[in-house]
Image: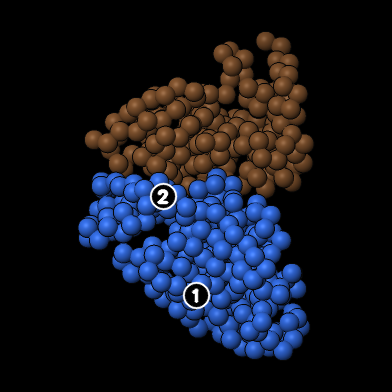
Amino acid sequence: MPNVTITVNGKSHTVDVAPETLLVELLREKLRLTGTHVGCDTSQCGACVVHVDGAAVKSCTMLAMTADGAKVTTIEGLANGSALHPMQEAFREHHGLQCGFCTPGMIMSAVDIVNRKGSELDEHTIREELEGNICRCTGYHNIVKAVAAGAKAMKGGAKPARAAE
Amino acid sequence: MYAFTYERPKNVDDAVKLLKKADDAKLLAGGQTLLPAMKLRLASPGTIVDLSGIKGLSGIKASSKAVVIGALTKHVEVMNSAEVQKSLPALAHLASVIGDPAVRNRGTIGGSLANNDPSADYPAAALGLGATIKTNKREIEADKFFKGLFETALGADEIIESVSFPVPEKAGYEKFRNPASRFALVGVFVSKGKDGARVAVTGAGESGVFRVKEMEAALGKDFSAKAIEGIKVPAKGMIADLHGTAEYRAHLIGVLARRAVAAAK
């Protein structure tokens, strides 16, 4: 079986994989990073979005072999210990999730949008840019609010205050 | 997905050797069409030749006469290229409406052209601008490249290296997207160049991308939306499916062609 050397969330792994293994299968089944979800498996829903060498990709539509040598960031790589990433905190604060299934992909796409477009995002831009991520619960409204707030918080570098526990 | 043998050559010559060696090999570029097709078992190649390890097949070079784009150049690079935005804004716009951001980060121009999906965007630009497709063996004019549904003039051991788009006086692309798949229900690319006007339609034809000669003749005399107002495209030969009838698609061609001409720059 061929092997893949891949850096995931800063840690290097060398893993034996069958050639038909998808990147998302490598992440979930070999590395046990199950935060990345498989929703549709047909490149529509975006639940599997991760960053490969800094760019958002659908990890169900990339072979693990193609990611050989790449640096991958998954949802597990965002938080700093127990402190949530500002975008995660914003989703929590603004009720940007209900069932939570789409959330890892939403947040990875949202961080990618901020990386590309900066921290001042209007509603139209956010909705356009999230077109590859599908949510069946929220109606998107609070997701859009969360992304706008998370984007601002990422710029400040300050962690938004947690809601009272 | 069925099992396959995986190869990742470092240069085009090695890729060609691998294609010759295996009897049912497929080239993998960005994989945004091939991998879903393999998962649905619509494709089951015995060997995957992954082109992502080959350097020098991506990048954009623009002059006053032509924009040359390497086969492995991703949609996101075309849409964000300052040179493409300046010389051929219609092409940058076309790239920006393919799929979604994550798909545009992986999908490539060469992959789109070689696959020749009847609803893909790039075939409309290639045909609508009279592009030249350069392979490891020869140069193929767009008019001779597209051969019907998912069929092209490419040989079994032929690899697209780059695509050269002549810079027109004006060009425009209008797409009516299928909201679920984001493919073109109909897309129309128009251009006005030194050899006259071209009108290429994707998403509508049962045999893939095609030109509308009647509109080209009218636009050649007067490149305005008004010039093609009275031209109706017959519904015969149009795709009919649950997303739209043949008549609907034929109607959309007229609407989108007029919008594309009006928006051309």
Q: Residue at x 73, y 19 (%)?
A: A158
Q: Nearer the viewer, residue B233 or B107?
A: B107
Q: Residue at x 51, y 65 (%)?
A: B163
Give the quarter of the image for residue B34: bottom left
Amino acid under disc 2: Ile
Q: Secondary structure at mark 2?
A: loop
Image position of A40 (left or right of A108)? left
Q: Which mark is residue B54?
A: 2
Give x and y (percent) for residue B249.
57, 74
* Residue A126 versus residue B57 in the image, above or below: above
Between label 1 and label 2, give the one nearer the viewer: 2
Q: Nearer the viewer, residue B72 or A55?
A: B72
Residue beneath label 1, please?
B142
Give x and y (percent) for residue A93.
70, 23
Chain for mark 2? Answer: B
Q: Nearer the viewer, residue B30 or A127?
A: B30
Chain depicted in blue: B
Give the quarter of the image for residue B111: bottom left
Q: Nearer the viewer, residue A143 or B65?
A: B65
